[in-house]
Image (tube, coloured by chain):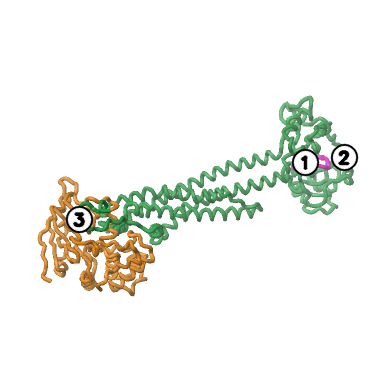
Chain colours: A green, B orange
């Protein structure tokens, strides 16, 4: 062991070997809290910057995840195997009607489970009384429909009863939700009547909103028989709803148009209403990305805030840095202290931000009646991103603090 | 008052490596033809061939007017700065042979500092401020607090242990700083104008404390501009224009 002795010492002098500075790890972490303890307001404000950024990101991720899961549940209950066949509109797109036997033809396709015919009653308007001027139609249409409509569209009755075999032959109608509201019918008494084309129809029911066919919400629905009998409707379908074997939706989709109208298949539009819901969600995704981007910007600004506070802190605490060097701190100890402080600021902001984001998601989801879902990656990512920002923000001030010469640091009073 | 402060190996073996009491013979501090120049045009020579030695158990004042080079001398004695040429030896270690990190280790274990501005952390108790004196020697907080309590008792502040530093009087603050410097029983204590910010009563008390600590075996160098303070100590080294002007000892 004699080789490890300082070579400058005479052999008879046994100087103890120099033990390097060393800090207990817990104490090292404790030094990172000095700034927090001595400058509380500033600490809180700089952590707040990070907190807002993280909360925004976690909240946005949580909300989009919650609404996505809500959509999946909705699609699940509505079924994605519904297709609508419509006469095409627009210039040169034909008569706006499907062939009279289109429903019959479609029902012959193997995987088709149900077909429901909808026939718009042209020119028919609905009035609450015969005193209402002709022009005040309230934008309510009259649609003659198959009795299977409510089941096919996964709709439901809000009050009263849906049309049935017994009432179908009589002048009875069931109102869509918006139509009922506009006609001022909130409860079905069984004695309310509405005037359709000079013929009184008894209102037997009011429906809830259709998720898959919002335009029917604005309609008074009558049976095909009643429409033919009392309104002189030709019962030619304007659209046909088709429920198909869920495994063969695409196959059926491809053949629906030529089946419905073999002469002019190009005049037939086939749609999948659930696609609209998914498209709406996709639009929501774009919005989510935008808000995530805003959250990231907030986070970055928060990081700059922390860097700023740390740089000022290093300038203000020169004397402390000098003292620590005099007490035996190495450059590494000093830089670790300031880096630790930046990490701590960001970490506090990150944890607070995640908590705030989770809270916001939970409250909003509750208000909307959704199940609140916070993706674990949002929580881990939120804290992780905060720490990453903190490390980035603290690096330069920490290096500056370490490079400060002890004599310069102590000279400032 | 004769027992060394921390030589209890059960408390912390790391704190037991004190050059002062266990490092054999030879001076605690030695300057050999030390020159310090600051780069400017023309270069400023703050120290111009200074040689002197401080033996174990000595109490001396380094006295000189401002600009005499005594601050530079303090920084080099405290290994906070390196000489341009010449050799400095602290507790048997040649400073020129040591890396920056080694010097930190040397300061952590062998050198205690007392500053004119106290340099205490506000918002922390006297106890924790003193406990920081051994922070970079690796002791756990509980051990360091135990030592700090002893040190505060030695400087007569056992009744101020839990007071925050910024709520103490100037004299008390300087006592806390002294307690921090003696924590870990360093080989040498460097006090830079320790009475510079104090009224005469507190100043006298600090000088008495320094004398008492020296009486208990501590090696102490006091840097001062005040010849009256210097006259209170058994040895005075006068500095002028970066050179040693005089080095006098009063008979014991």
Q: Do the numbered discs 2 and 1 sit on residues whose CB atoms are within 8 Å?
A: no
Residue A11: image tag: 3
Instruction: Report which quarter residue A119 is drawn in.
Output: top right
Residue placed at 38% from the left, 57% from the top? A28
Work out whether residue B115 can be spotted: no
Tag in front: 1 or 3: 3
- Percent x, y of residue B2: 24, 72
What is the residue that sits farthest to the top in this orientation? Answer: A263
- Percent x, y of residue B121: 34, 63
Q: Is residue A351 above or below residue B127?
A: above
For the residues marked 2 and 1, what is the alpha-carbon distance in whole angstroms? 17 Å
Q: The magenta stretch spans which residues?
A: A139-149
Instruction: Report which quarter residue A75 is drawn in.
Output: top right
Q: Is residue B12 above or below residue A167?
A: below
Q: Is residue A338 above or below residue A269?
A: below
Residue placed at 80% from the left, 38% from the top? A113
Q: Which residue is mark 1?
A: A141
Q: Nearer the viewer, residue B150 or A380?
A: B150
Residue A225: image tag: 2
For the residues marked 3 and 2, what is the alpha-carbon distance in whole angstroms? 121 Å
Mark 3 or mark 2: name the one nearer the start of the chain: 3
Crowd around label 3: few <14 · some 14–19 · many ≥20 (10 Å): few
Mark 1 or mark 3: name the one nearer the start of the chain: 3
The quarter of the picture where the N terminus of chain B appears is bottom left
Instruction: Report which quarter residue A366 is drawn in.
Output: bottom right
- Magenta-span inclusion, residue A141: yes
Q: Nearer the viewer, residue B172 or A169?
A: B172
Q: Nearer the viewer, residue A378 or B6?
A: B6
Q: Chain of mark 3?
A: A
Q: Chain of mark 2?
A: A
- Magenta-span inclusion, residue A29: no
For the residues marked 1 and 3, what is the alpha-carbon distance in whole angstroms? 112 Å
């Amino acid at each position: 062991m004699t080789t490890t002795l300082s070579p400058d010492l005479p052999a008879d002098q046994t100087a103890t070997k120099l033990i390097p500075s060393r800090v207990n790890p817990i104490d090292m972490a404790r030094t990172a809290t000095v700034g927090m303890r001595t400058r509380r307001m500033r600490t809180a404000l700089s952590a707040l910057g990070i907190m807002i950024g993280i909360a925004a990101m976690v909240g946005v991720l949580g909300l989009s995840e919650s609404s996505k899961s809500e959509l999946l549940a909705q699609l699940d209950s509505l079924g994605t195997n519904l297709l609508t066949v419509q006469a095409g509109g627009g210039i040169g797109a034909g008569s706006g009607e499907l062939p009279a036997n289109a429903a019959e033809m479609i029902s012959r396709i193997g995987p088709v489970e149900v077909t429901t015919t909808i026939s718009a009653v042209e020119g028919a308007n609905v009035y609450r009384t015969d005193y209402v001027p002709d022009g005040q139609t309230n934008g309510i249409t009259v649609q003659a429909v198959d009795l299977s409509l409510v089941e096919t569209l996964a709709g439901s009755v809000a009050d009263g009863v849906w049309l049935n075999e017994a009432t179908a032959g009589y002048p009875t109608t069931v109102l869509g939700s918006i139509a009922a509201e506009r006609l001022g019918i909130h409860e079905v008494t069984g004695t309310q009547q509405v005037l359709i084309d000079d013929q009184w129809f008894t209102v037997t029911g009011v429906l809830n909103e259709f998720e898959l066919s919002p335009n029917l919400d604005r309609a008074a629905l009558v049976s095909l028989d009643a429409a033919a009998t009392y309104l002189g409707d030709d019962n030619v379908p304007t659209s046909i709803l088709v429920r198909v074997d869920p495994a063969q939706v695409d196959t059926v989709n491809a053949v629906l148009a030529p089946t419905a109208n073999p002469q002019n298949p190009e005049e037939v539009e086939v749609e999948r209403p659930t696609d609209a819901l998914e498209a709406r969600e996709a639009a929501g995704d774009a919005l989510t990305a935008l808000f995530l981007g805003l959250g990231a910007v907030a986070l970055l600004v928060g990081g700059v805030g922390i860097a700023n506070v740390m740089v000022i802190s290093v300038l203000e605490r020169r004397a402390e840095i000098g003292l620590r060097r005099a007490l035996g701190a190495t450059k590494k100890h000093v830089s670790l202290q300031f880096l630790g402080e930046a990490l701590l600021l960001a970490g506090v902001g990150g944890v607070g931000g995640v908590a705030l984001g989770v809270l916001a998601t939970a409250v909003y989801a509750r208000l909307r009646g959704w199940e609140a879902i916070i993706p674990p990656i949002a929580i881990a990512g939120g804290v992780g991103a905060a720490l990453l920002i903190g490390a980035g923000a603290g690096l330069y001030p920490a290096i500056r603090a370490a490079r400060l010469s002890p004599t310069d640091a102590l000279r400032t009073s | 008052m004769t027992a060394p402060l921390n030589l209890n190996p059960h408390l912390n073996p790391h704190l037991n490596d004190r050059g002062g009491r266990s490092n054999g013979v030879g001076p605690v501090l030695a300057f050999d033809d030390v020159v310090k120049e600051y780069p400017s045009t023309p270069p400023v020579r703050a120290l111009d061939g200074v040689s002197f030695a401080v033996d174990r158990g000595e109490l001396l004042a380094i006295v000189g007017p401002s600009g005499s080079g005594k601050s530079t001398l303090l920084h080099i004695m405290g290994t906070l700065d390196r000489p341009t040429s010449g050799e400095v030896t602290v507790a048997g270690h040649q400073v020129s042979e040591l890396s920056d990190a080694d010097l930190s280790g040397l300061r952590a274990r062998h050198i205690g500092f007392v500053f004119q501005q106290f340099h205490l952390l506000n918002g922390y108790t006297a106890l924790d401020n003193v406990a920081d004196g051994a922070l970079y020697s690796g002791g756990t907080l509980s051990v360091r607090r135990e030592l700090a309590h002893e040190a505060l008792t030695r400087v007569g502040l056992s009744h101020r242990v839990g007071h925050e530093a910024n709520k103490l009087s100037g004299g008390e603050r300087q006592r806390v700083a002294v307690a921090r410097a003696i924590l870990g029983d360093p080989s040498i204590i460097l006090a830079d104008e320790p009475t510079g910010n104090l009224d005469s009563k507190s100043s006298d008390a600090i000088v008495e404390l320094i004398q008492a600590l020296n009486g208990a075996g501590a090696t102490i160098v006091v840097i001062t501009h005040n010849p009256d303070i210097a006259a209170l100590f058994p040895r005075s080294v006068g500095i002028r224009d970066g050179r040693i002007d005089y080095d006098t000892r009063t008979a014991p």
